Structures are given as structure tokens and as C-alpha cells.
Image (spheres, grey):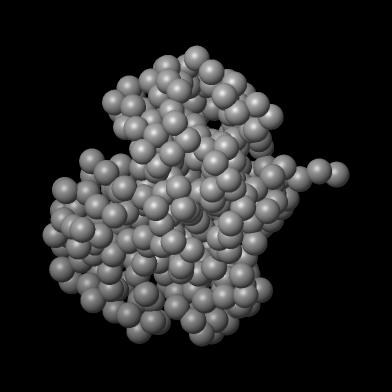
Amino acid sequence: MTLRLRHEVLRLALRDPFRIARTEHGGGHQVTTVIVELEDDRFPGLVGYGEGYPDSFYGETPATMAAVWPRLLEAVGEPEPTSAGLAAAGEAMAAAIRWNGAAKCALDSALLDLAGKATDTPAWRLLGLTTSIPPTDFTLGLDEPAIVAERARRAGGFPALKIKVGGPADLATLRAVRDAYDKPIRVDANTGWTPDVAVELLPELVALGVELIEQPFPAGRLDWLADLQQRSSLPIVADESCVTDEDLDALVGVVAGVNVKVAKCGGPGPAARMLARARGLGFRTFLGCMEETSVVIAASAAVASLADWVDLDGNLLLAADPFDGLDLGPDHAWVLGDAPGLGVRRRTG
């Protein structure tokens, strides 16, 4: 085997406290992510960067990621640095292990970066996609309404805000944000609502100009999701209920949209295929992220031309991103250029 993988566990501070309804993610002050460096004897001197975010909600830790990489490396063998070779590697990983999306994501994104560098091809082109992508929104975590409103003022240049909800002050928070911000608001309950709460809030959300509601209920309650979507003029978007491509069929007729994340589904290659299939099934597509570095945000941006809504702000939530090379345009869309691979590099100094 010519592939060699090294990994580093990073614990990164957040710029502002960031809490969500179902977990506090490192107490809301720091996050854990895993960076990999992939080398291939066929391409001496080149390193492919990848990243996986081990979310315990999906049963992953840095230790589980390290445990499955040998099997995944054995499965992919020596993939050719082509679109077909990358697709075959993704299929091989899916056949080798069913879940472990973060572990697959780290390797899949590293393979994409390395293949791009080996062939002097940007990641988006290797995936057969385009540079025309929607702008990203900016996410604000749970906190006191006045604090969230102040953060909304600071983020006023973004074309949309995603507000984390799922606590007792949801309505007060959203009203405070609306007073401070006049553009689209998206709400994400991260499984934190009950049907009674959602139905009570629904007319208020419409009146406040909310654009969509993301994952209001526990992941397995597709019946609750379907009932709310029937009542709602706003699109309901499945996130925790939509982890991989396997989940799409069961959501047809249940929700209007699905949130695809490379950390959940196994990397940019699987994400591109999942987004394309979701569109074919009639879903509106949302491309999300975790609190990750520019490595995975760049990998995600490479598939963003397949998304209707983009939430790729994870690196912007960090106090210090250890990578650079990914630029946010004046329209708040990530700039996809002609740099080979993901176009990111480790910061020095």
C-alpha cells in the first residue's frame, strides 16, 4: 500500500460561547476536531489535508476514527487521482464500514486534496461541479436574548442568520434578533422541541419572517415532522433525521428539505452524490457544517453548487483557524478558485 495517514486531534477555542439544544459541544467554549495528512508514494512531496469532526451524537470519537482508518485505507487501496478514482474510493469505504461518517470524511477530503494537488486540479472541478455557490449564513448559539441580539448586530453583513433555539426563551430571542437584523432568519432546534411547542410557535415564526425550521424534533420522530410540515407554510429541514443517503427515501413526503453535512455522510464525494439525489427526489437542499477548520469548510464549499441554502461558517466560529487559503467573498460566498485540491494550507507563525 502506498498511502500513509497521520492524524492530529485539535481542541480549538470558539470565538463566542456556542451552545445548542441537544449538547453543549465542549461546554460551548471549545470543540474537538481531527486533522489528517495523507501521503502517497506515487506523488512524492505532496500532502493531502483532510478533516473529520467526531460528534458523539453519531457515536464517534477521535479514538473510533483512528480505529477504523486502517480498514478504510485497505478498502480504498491505491485510488487513481481522477473523478472516477475518487468515486470508487468512496464506494469502497461505504462498502467496508456502514457508519463512521467523520472517519470517512477525513480520508475522503484528504484523497480529494491530494488528487487535486497531483493533477493540478481544484477540488470542485474534480467533483464535476461549478464555482457558482450560494452565500453562507452565520450561526448564533443559544444564550440570553439580549446577547444573541448583540451578536446578530455584529453579524449584520451576512445575508441570513441561523439561530439556535430549543430553550425556554426561544420567542424572546427571535424577537430580539428581528429587532436587530432585517434579513432572513433560519431557526434550528437541534431536536429540542415537542410538537406542542412547535405548533404554538409556528404562527409567531411566520410573523417574524423566519425562512425555515431545521430539525425541531428527535431524529426518529418522522411522524411528528410530517405532521408539522403539513401544518407549516415554512419548509421543515431534516438534519439529525438525515445522516446519509440511506435516510432520504424515508423522508420523501415528510419534510421539504434535508441538511447534508460532509461529517455525517462521509466526505465531499458522498455529499455531492447525496445532494444530487436529494434534488432528484424533490427536496430543497441545505449544506451544513460542524465547528470545523477551513479544511472541511473548503471541502464542503466544493459541493455547494448543489445546495439551495448554505451554512458553512464553522471556521468563522473559531477563535483561531489553524488553516488559511479559503476566502469569503464580498457577497459572503466562499471563493472557489483554481488552486489545486482544497486550496488550504497550515498557518505558519
Residue 323 in the image: x percent, y percent?
69, 47
Residue 247 in the image: x percent, y percent?
23, 44
Asked whether the viewer can see residue 107, the reply is yes
Look at 22% across and 72% down and name the residue there. 232
> Image quadrant of residue 37?
top right
Left or right: 89, with 327 as reference point: left
Left or right: 236, with 74 as reference point: left
Left or right: 146, with 91 as reference point: right
Residue 347 in the image: x percent, y percent?
76, 45
Left or right: 324, with 244 as reference point: right
Total residue callouts? 0
Nearer to the camera, 166 or 49: 49
Nearer to the camera, 132 or 165: 132
Look at 85% across and 44% down and name the residue there. 349
Look at 81% across and 43% down and name the residue there. 348
Q: In this rendering, is residue 161 above or below 326? A: below
Nearer to the camera, 171 or 271: 271
Residue 25 in the image: x percent, y percent?
54, 44
> Image quadrant of residue 259?
bottom left
Q: In this rendering, is residue 232 above or below 221? A: below
Look at 54% across and 81% down and name the residue there. 181
Asked whether the viewer can see residue 141, the reply is no
